Image: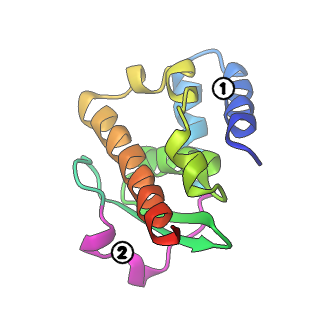
């Protein structure tokens, strides 16, 4: 699925909720549905720096598409990384690097997070784009 389509689906889903408590519940559910990361990947190398919670993120290239796996020790954070994976998983490094990720602002996610969680969200995005940059250099 292309990035824009995934973002549109998320916007549509979030529009179904009237308040942020319901949206938080939905984010938590998304985190619960995130496939388990291999425990061997829960290393300091895969830990995202700058997050209030522990968030592990790992990517591999499969036929020039990046596949992400992640986990967190906090349920909200796990849901946030699940949202990002939903949008950026199975995309080329070029598509990931050029993704604007407008849905984050449009659903109001960043403005409804504490400053430390909002910073963590930015760090997650940065790390996913860093993987994309590394794989794009590797493949060229």
- Place residue 116 in its image quadrant: top left
Magenta span: chief secondary structure: loop
Q: Is residue 22 above or below residue 39?
A: above
Density class for disc 2 (Cα within 10 Å; few <14, some 14-19, many ≥20) is: some
Can the viewer see residue 31? no
Left or right, residue 97 beside residue 103? left
44 within the magenta span: yes
- Disc number at residue 42? 2
Can the viewer see residue 116? yes
For the image, the number of numbered tags is 2
Of residues 94 and 123, the one drawn nearer to the viewer in this rendering: 94
- Disc number at residue 33? none
- Place residue 56 in its image quadrant: bottom left
Residue shown at the point (59%, 59%) measured from the top left: 34
Q: Secondary structure at mark 2?
A: loop
Residue 69, position in %: x, y? 52, 66
Left or right, residue 7 beside residue 24? right
138 within the magenta span: no
Q: Secondary structure at mark 1?
A: helix
- Residue receiving disc 1: 14
Q: Earlier in the sequence, mark 1 or mark 2?
A: 1
Residue 136, position in %: x, y? 49, 61
Residue 112, position in %: x, y? 41, 22
As drawn, which residue projects farthest toward the top?
A: 18
Q: CA distance from mark 1 to mark 2?
A: 30 Å
Magenta residues (range)? 33-47
Residue 133, position in %: x, y? 43, 56
Residue shown at the point (42%, 44%) measured from the top left: 125
- Place residue 107 in its image quadrant: top right
Q: Is residue 108 above or below residue 45?
A: above
Residue shown at the point (57%, 71%) measured from the top left: 61
């Amino acid at each position: 699925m292309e990035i824009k389509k995934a973002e549109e689906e998320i916007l549509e889903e979030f529009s179904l909720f009237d308040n942020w408590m319901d949206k938080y519940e939905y984010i938590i559910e998304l985190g619960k549905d995130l496939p388990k990361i291999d425990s061997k990947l829960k290393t300091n190398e895969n830990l995202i720096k700058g997050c209030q919670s522990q968030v592990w993120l790992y990517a591999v290239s499969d036929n020039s598409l990046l596949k992400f796996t992640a986990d967190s020790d906090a349920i909200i954070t796990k849901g946030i990384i699940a949202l990002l994976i939903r949008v950026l998983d199975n995309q080329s490094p070029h598509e990931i690097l050029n993704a604007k990720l407008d849905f984050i602002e449009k659903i109001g996610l960043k403005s409804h997070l504490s400053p430390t969680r909002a910073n963590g969200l930015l760090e997650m995005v940065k790390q996913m784009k860093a993987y994309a940059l590394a794989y794009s250099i590797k493949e060229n």
